[in-house]
Image: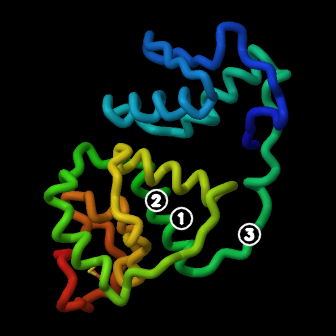
Amino acid sequence: MKLKIKANSMREPPGGHHFTESGVTFTGDKFEEVVNKLTLFRINNGVALGMPAQDILMRYAKKWPYLVERDFSVEETKPDTNLRERWSKWIAKLWSKPPKSLISAKEAKPRWDICKDCKFNVDLDVSDSGEDGQIKRRSFLLRRGQDVPDSLNFCSFHGMPLDVGCLLENPGDFSSAPPGEKYEKCWVK
Ligand code: SF4
């Protein structure tokens, strides 16, 4: 069962949104700020990522049950396209073991310049809310908040979201391109 902050609730935990782990207390004006801080803390300290938002919500449920409710939306079956499914699975896989380091924007720029005009760079047209919004938020965290060009979408050849994939040191390790097939203009080794 998944939880979420109760809709339209104007109430907050006593002392504001916060969560303590390993002796560190993460605070924020909004619940999402605490989630982001806990996520980055786990990534930066090599701690198993787990499900930061759900970990906080479980604590809230025990201490302040009036703040949370069951999230039925994530249990609905959604009509996913194949590419969207690949996008979702790619992010989930990387999320379970985030990269310890990324290349810089300067290093990534030659990659961006090739991908932006590539025929395999396709717009998935996913939503900013619900499960899609959650995946986008994970992308943002996986790329450590780095700004990337809007022209980067999803690589349908490697099955890889380009906003994160272009920043990986070895993106070929995360490619689902057909075995033995190469695209001669591609920079991925
Ligand atoms: S095939 Fe290569 S160059 Fe083309 S979008 Fe994918 S990663 Fe970029």
Q: Earlier in the sequence, mark 1 or mark 3?
A: 3
Q: Are marks 1 and 2 in contact (CB under 8 Å)?
A: yes
- Residue 116 spot, x, y in % from top left: 31, 77
Against 172, residue 184 (above or below) is below
Q: Residue, x 50% and y 73% (percent of image)? A: 86
What's the amino acid at mark 1?
A: Ser
Q: Is residue 166 left or right of residue 162?
A: left
Residue visible at 75% across and 14% down in the picture:
63
* Image position of 11 with respect to 184: above or below: above
The secondary element bearing badge 2 is classed as helix
Percent position (x, y) of residue 189?
16, 75
Vertical side of 164 occupied by 27: above or below: above
Label 3 CB-ligand 1 distance < 8 A? no
- Quadrant placement of the N terminus: top right
6, above or below 76, in the image: above
Q: Which mark is residue 91?
A: 2
Quadrant housing residue 161? bottom left
Which residue is pictured at 35% across the width and 78% down the height?
A: 158
Q: Position of residue 70 (x, y in %)?
A: 82, 39
Determine crowd level at label 1: few under 14, some 14-19, many 20+ residues with C-alpha closer than 10 A. some
**The image quadrant in which ligand 1 is located:** bottom left
Q: Does label 2 or label 3 sit earlier along the sequence?
A: 3
Q: Quadrant of the rendered structure where residue 168 is?
A: bottom left
Separation (CA) of disc 1 from disc 3: 12 Å
Q: Which residue is mark 3?
A: 78
Q: Is residue 91 left or right of residue 32?
A: left
Residue 88, label in figure:
1
Which residue type does callout 2 highlight?
Ile
